[in-house]
Image: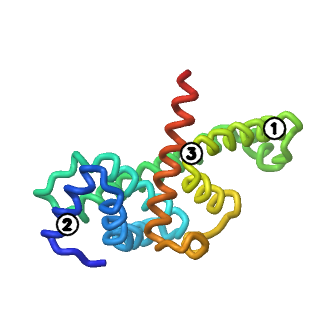
Amino acid sequence: MKISEEELLIILEKAKAGKQIAFSMLLDAFWNDVYGFLLVRTENENDAEDITIQTFSKAFDKIDSYNSNFNFKTWLITIAKNLHIDLFRKRKRNILENINYGNDAVKKVLDDTPSIEDILITEQNLATLLQDIKKLKPNYQKIINLRYFNELSYAEISKELNEPISNVKVKLLRAKKLLSGIIKTKDKS
């Protein structure tokens, strides 16, 4: 979807006012640019998709800080680049930590069979997560279930819900943010 500079300014004002349709339009207009940029950098479709989603999430959270004197696409690409650098540094740090552990890391890799305690903790965490998901609105519950429990692709979810893929991406993004808020609020109390 191509939009003119005038249209972009109007859409950005609506986004700053919290209009969902504006976020969807921005996602449609710039998804391919950001995803393509990240795909070249990461050479990994999953990483590119994850960082693209994080980029839009961060951009939508910080939309009020966007300065219209600068190109919006450049702003998004800068966010994407910084998120990619953060991911790269984190992975590098994890690799170095694993090297420093030497034999312990090898033992972990060799014996990855979960203990009874690990299984119990996982089941308890899953039960807690399911309770938190139930606190979301039904449409957000459904999209999380389709994506993470039924493991459907965006295209399959789009077909299931009879909605454009961009709406699915935005709804999933929102659902994850709302769920994260529920979990963080619960952790503080």
Q: Residue most toward the top?
A: 189
Q: Earlier in the sequence, mark 1 or mark 2?
A: 2
Screen quadrant of the C terminus: top right
* Relative vertical location of residue 10 with respect to residue 186 in this rendering, above or below: below
Q: Is residue 157 left or right of residue 113?
A: left
Q: Residue most toward the right?
A: 116
Q: Earlier in the sequence, mark 2 or mark 3?
A: 2
Q: Quadrant of residue 159?
A: bottom right
Assess whether mark 1 and mark 3 are in contact (beta carbons under 8 angstroms).
Answer: no
Q: Residue most toward the front?
A: 138
| Residue at screen point 31% across, 71% down | 29
What is the number of the mark on residue 136?
3
| Residue at screen point 46% across, 52% down | 174
| CA separation in Å, label 2 and label 3 | 31 Å
Q: Pointer 1: what residue?
A: 118
Q: Is residue 2 left or right of residue 132?
A: left
Q: Pointer 2: what residue?
A: 8
Give the residue type that dot 3 points to: Leu
Residue 188 placed where, x, y %?
Answer: 53, 24
Give the residue type that dot 2 points to: Leu
Q: Earlier in the sequence, mark 3 or mark 1?
A: 1
Quick one: SS at disc 3? loop
**Residue nearest the viewer, comparing 110 with 183:** 183
**Residue nearest the viewer, comparing 62 with 167:** 167
Select label 2 or label 3 by which is in front.
Answer: 3
Assess whether mark 3 and mark 2 are in contact (beta carbons under 8 angstroms).
Answer: no
Select label 1 or label 2 by which is in front.
Answer: 2
Give the residue type that dot 1 points to: Asp
